[in-house]
Image (cartoon, rainbow, N blue to C red):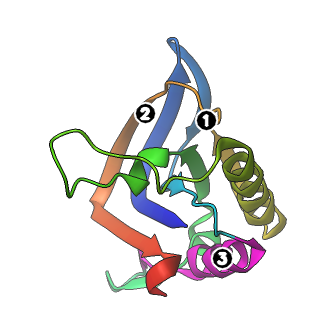
Amino acid sequence: MKVVLQRVRHAQVAIEDQVVGKIGVGYLLLVGIENTDTTQQIDYLVHKIVNLRVFEDENQKMNLNLKQVNGSILSVSQFTLYADTKHGNRPSFTKAGDPDHAEKCYTLFNQKLQAAGIAVETGKFGADMQVDLQNDGPVTIIFDTDQA
């Protein structure tokens, strides 16, 4: 799995000009799945994301996690995280997970984030979405379970 995490002041996702997910302070997660991903990768990422300390404390040190700032997550599926751009000018997406497997993993990932006590909003798997955000910091962190 690959997840691009952006610390945001606010974010929203829309489909055909209809907002389907919206948060205030928290994380925008762009989530990519490959066919070899299992619940082990999902559990690893949920633990890392829920406990990640990238919010500032009273001393302006990145020392607080999402729960400590009462933050939320906007989770958006994004198969293009598995783009292969090594050959030619048109990316290949053959490393991206089969849609059925990827959707199951994406749904389970979001359910496990919610079970950890985090409010989670989502886009719609496979839809053409427009994402608006205000990155805070900016803070952007990339998780790749193949490199964990």
- Residue 1 vertical position relative to residue 48 in the rendered view, above or below: above
Indicate the quadrant containing the N terminus: top left, top right, bottom left or bottom right.
bottom right
Farthest residue toward the front?
A: 87
What's the residue type where badge 3 is placed?
Gln
In the image, is 77 to the left or to the right of 55? right
Residue 39 drawn in magenta:
yes
Q: Which residue is mark 3?
A: 41
Q: What is the C-alpha distance between the residues marked 2 and 3?
A: 25 Å
Alpha-carbon distance for marks 1 and 2? 9 Å
Residue shown at 47%/57% (left/top)?
A: 95
User: Which span of residues is magenta-colored?
Assistant: 38-56
Three-letter amino acid code of the residue under disc 1: Gly
17 left or right of 111 in image: left
Query: Disc 1 vs disc 2: Cβ atoms closer than 8 Å?
Result: yes
Residue 102, above or below 131? below
Mark 1, residue position? 123
| Residue drawn at (41%, 54%) of the image | 81
